Image (cartoon, rainbow, N blue to C red):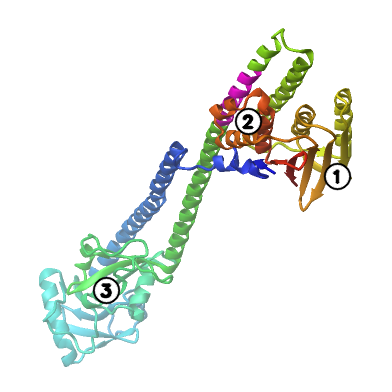
Amino acid sequence: MSFVRLSHPKARALRPGSWVRALPLPSRRVSSWAVLLLWALVCTVLALLPRWWIQGWSVRTQDRWFASATSKAGRLAQIWEHSLGPVPAFTRGDEPVIRDYLAKECLTRFLIDTATNRVWVRESGRLRLATPEESEVPRDWAARATASGWFRWTPGLPMPKAWGKGASIVAFDRQWCLLKCWNPGSPEVERWLEQNLGVADGYRFGIVSGSEYRALMERIEGQGWLETFDPSLSPRTLQVTHSAEAPCRYSPGLSQAFGGNWSVVVMMSPGEFRSFRDAYFFRRRMVWLAYGALVGISAVGLSMFLFSQQRERIHSDHLASLAHSLKTPLAVLRSRCDTVLNGDLERETRQAQMLQIGTEIALLTRLIERGLEQTRLGGQEPTGDRIDSAFFESLDEELTPAFEARGRQLEVYCSDLIFHAPASALRTALVTLMENALLHGEGLVELRAVQEKGRILLVVRDEGLGLSVEVARSLQEGHSSHSSAQEASVSPGQHLGLLMLARLARNEGWGLSLENLEPGFMASLEIWI
């Protein structure tokens, strides 16, 4: 007993044009990988543009805002250095005009009358005469201011008692010298800022001492809401991260108006900063959405481009494989035709040769149709036809006359089977097996179709001698090597139709096995469902 398996079921996964061939393997898809790498590189470079644009917009917006805020701060510095207007005449210090004047001059602490050399001290919204001890330092400062037009306190000079910690200045206005004190964060400073800036102004103006400024710088250095602090910037820019705080800028020019080691800092108000921050995040979302849309559209276009290239390669692979597989069968058919044209052949031999030629032409036709159909579908599997008992009945009616003409008997057994398979390919395969049994076998020929564990088993059996050892070995080698030379070694009399049938079964994903029995010969076709 000999057994030859020419095709294994589900072999379609390894044939040309299958999903394995469709994978973008580097060895066969070098150009596709190059395109993908170039696209990824371009997307990476473009990813830098949103960040660059957002940062540029942030810096430009802050520069414009701080330029406007610094202009307003310059006006505040001028008001600080000079009085708002002449001091009204008074005698007691509690007149209504004096109260109104002090309400406007929130930062004034002493008034020195240069004509009488009397010193008045601010106390609870009114003025009172200073004691001799309180008058000593203010008179000295007033003398300095009278000589130069104004005077600013510098470290090392005495301070008035109970003056507190803050920037000090003396403004000279004709007869009067005004001693002002700026205590950062005090109620007087807040009222003064509200009077000169307005309640709803979009920025804050303040001064910090050198040590406090350094502490502020150390606290927020390296955090950087939009950029990190760089001491080399002029004017310096400080960025903070807390939602209630805002970017602030140090102005070295305006800081000279307050003397000592005081520094002027201009900062966005919380409301202004929230608006700026909302605009920043909105623009960031929009620019990244635009970037994502650009990447998505380009990815779709690239996928379509690569898909079209892949389809072209699959089509060319199908056509090349199809052309290669037809070379040897066509050469054998040509040899058969030349043999049939020989007038010395007997009539029966000539008819058998012509019948064999018809069978092989049917197989070649199916192979060509199958290959062209797969090429048209881009490597996808064609949809199957409905196969039922009527299919086997028509096959029995078609082949019975040929068996009866040779005095042979054909029996077809089919239960109530219903499955899907390419009807043309299945008919060609079964006709080839039964014609092979008719020409090379003996006795009764049976065709049985049964269903077993998820597969359809089609068995063609006769009572002949079966395949010789040489033919079986030649069929096995010719199928496993897929070589034209090996195919050519299977002569017309050595069942070339079976080898072509094995190729058809392999393309369809069916299993085909040939087995010699004692006695008889059996060919089995397996179709998985």
Main SS of the magenta part reads helix
* Residue count near mark 2 (Cα–Cα under 10 Å), binned few <14, some 14–19, many ≥20: many
The mark lying in front, picked from 3 and 1, is 1
Q: How far apart in space, not on screen, are marks 3 and 1 (Cα)?
A: 86 Å
Residue furthest to the top: 343
Query: Where does the magenta region start and end?
Result: 315-333
| Nearest-to-viewer mark from 2 and 3 | 2
Query: Label 1, label 2: how many angstroms apart (C-alpha)?
Result: 31 Å
Q: Which residue occupies the foreground of this view, 189 or 491?
A: 491
In the rendered image, residue 56, in percent from the top left (x then y), is placed at: 36, 52
Mark 1 surroundings: few (<14), some (14-19) or many (≥20) residues within 10 A: few
Using the image, tell me which numbered label, if any, was put on residue 417.
Answer: 1
The answer to whether residue 117 is visible is no
Q: Secondary structure at mark 1?
A: loop
Looking at the image, is mark 1 or mark 2 nearer the viewer? 1
| Three-letter code, disc 2 | Thr
Identify the residue position indicated by label 2 in the image.
375
Residue bearing the label numbered 3: 218
Q: Residues within 10 Å of mark 3 (few under 14, many from 20)?
A: few
Q: Earlier in the sequence, mark 3 or mark 1?
A: 3
Badge 3 amino acid: Glu
Residue located 17% across and 87% down the image: 135
